[in-house]
Amino acid sequence: MQASSAGFCYGVNRAVDLVEQAARGGKPTVTYGPIAHNRHLVAHFEALGIRAVSAPEEVPDGATVVIRSHGVPRAVYEALLARLVEVIDATCPSVKRIHRLVAAAEEQGRQPVIIGTPTHPEVEAIAGWCSHPLVFANAEELEKWLREAPERAELPVTMVSQTTSTQFLWESCKKIAKKVWTNREIFDTICGATENRQAEAAELASQCEAMLVVGDKNSSNTCRLAHICREHCGRVALVDSAADIRPDDYRGISSIGLTAGASTPAWIIKEVNKTMSEITNVDAVQEESFEALLENSIKTLNTGDKVLGTVTAIGTTEVQVDLGTKHAGYIPYDEVSADPTVKPEDVLKVGDEIEVFVVRVNDQEGTVQLSRKKLEGMKVWDDVEAACESKEPVEGVITEENKGGVVANVKGVRVFIPASQTGVPKGGDLSALKGQTVKMKITEFNRARRRVVGSIRAVNSEARKAAIEKIWSEIEVGKKYHGVVKSLTSYGAFVDIGGVDGMVHVSELSWGRIKTPDEVVKVGDPIDVFVIKFDPEKHKISLGYKTPEMNPWNQFTAKYSKGDVVPVKVVKIVDFGAFAEIMPGVDGLIHISQVADHRVDKVSDALSEGQELDAKIIDIDTERKRISLSVRALLEPAPAEENEEAETVAYSTDSAE
């Protein structure tokens, strides 16, 4: 039994395709390092004149250099770009994502932590995208490093994994990280294809008497597959090719499982499979050499194949293509492009080498119907599959609402987004999403069933998580934020400052006296706040809203001086005078001796509450924040030394009650 996921993963397959395309370009081509860990694949490319180099200066001027699927450190990448060469980056998209994660972490002042084999090319490349990475091969190393210096638990960290690591190793390291680090970012970067391959190998090994793992012994993911198989099966062999198989070891065994590493070429797997079939007398076939397989792949055409051809003529209804076989290939005009406005002569010319999809083979007539349009559609599906494996977000337009969720169009592929993954609250209006361009993660991909499932919520959750981590890593007393009021309570307002809620106490909402927060702010209001204090362990933040600039006393002193005449409103009458509001939050006292131009026995004989009138500022006590007002000063000329009762009686803005 052969595992369905055996052989090239998406990343290696893409890298191999890029090398082959580069070789067809006519320029000298090299790869930076072995394109993948398999000596047969490397030998195959060497036979085509494509050698591997290990330093930027080894790349010949004018050549094309293809960066291997494992990626390279930033310094190597920049050195290659500085050369007079064409650089094709075949780094696996899943690995490329990790490069961006560790680089961004370091820019944010975080400590990158990499879980993986330190000497593996992929890990060396990842480490090369940050200045001071920490690399741990296993949970024991990580735990030991933390024990050596307890203060390391205070570090803000971003943790990633080698894409071909095992889930057991990764989960054990995550458990330690979650227990020790409070300020942490953890990104699950094990490749989805790797997870599936390992799970499938484990299941197959548990069902078979023996297991064959095919691949190069220098391949990390191949060795891990062998390790996983040994946990479930007593007889496991790691073979490089069919030549390593000893027939006598498998005589009489009824069930043999076969899996292969992500860098193992298909022809090696096929040769091993045939050899094992002959040994067990099951589905025996005539053994073919790689050269024969290659020749047959060129000469035999089947529906669904992707082949290369050369445009020989552009007719009135079809484009003729030479495929290098006895068949005459043709592309109907309506299969040239998915865009109906495109004319064949605008995108094709005689002599062009193009890749096409085999729609139908007619051996009797010797013709092959081809399509470029279907191939474009297949490449879109390839892109969506790659996004699913790399867990990179994609953009799409919501086109419809249906039972259970909404449908998005991603480059022509229909993606179903369940209601629970739209980000819309339960019972909310999903139709409001229609027509919107949204970002989502592909969570399920099944090309055979043409079923693709996405999640907007996953993108929003990751963005929110990153925003929260960023806030806690940069927060400090006095830092200002532009936030939105989320909710109100009797004691204050909760404000979202970008993924984290802080609380503005009612005493910090206004310089004046208020009874409830809604006298100042409402839910949904955008407001500017600043940090008063915070507690990272309890995840609590106290915010302030009232600033010195908002202080009514500061506003008063900036606007008025002693001797100014101001409009006031009587707000309270007491035995010794009347309190009058000059501006919200600032009151002055009109002493009984200053309420009229004649002596009065009761203040109420001259003034009444709610009365609006002008008064003169006759004294300002800045230190005690008190203001004295006079109506009398506006009713008669100020006599010299006449005012026996006019000793200045100051008033504090805090005593109006």
Image (tube, rainbow, N blue to C red):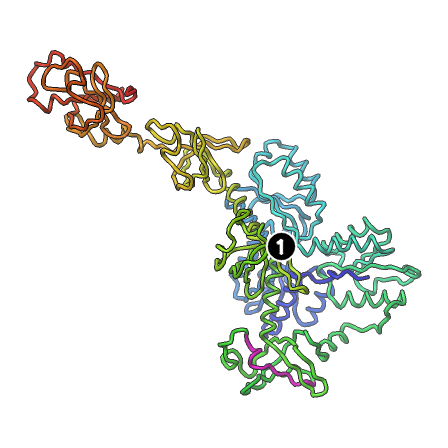
Please name the residue shown 83% across and 65% down the image: 243
Does residue 564 appear left or right of residue 553 in this picture?
left
Q: Magenta segment: does it hold 579?
A: no
Query: Picture quarter containing residue 626?
Result: top left
Find the magenta span and give its range: 326-337
Residue 370 position, x and y percent, is 63, 79
Total numbered badges shown on the rendered structure: 1
Query: Picture quarter containing residue 194?
Result: bottom right
Q: Is residue 58 visible in the rendered structure shown here? A: no
Residue 270 position, x and y percent, is 78, 67
Nearer to the camera, 545 or 247: 545
Please name the residue shown 24% across and 24% down the image: 571
Residue 443 position, x and y percent, is 62, 54
Residue 242 position, x and y percent, is 82, 65
Nearer to the camera, 396 or 252: 396
Q: Which residue is mark 1?
A: 443
Please rate how many residues cluster around mark 1, counting C-alpha atoms within 10 Å: few if below 14, some from 14 to 19, many from 20.
some
Quadrant including the C terminus: top left
Please name the residue shown 71% across and 45% down the image: 169
Label 1 sits on a secondary structure element that is: strand
Q: Is residue 134 above or below residue 637?
A: below
Judged from this view, the residue extending furthest toward the top is 644
Q: Identity of the amino acid at label 1?
A: Thr
Please name the residue shown 26% across and 31% down the image: 555
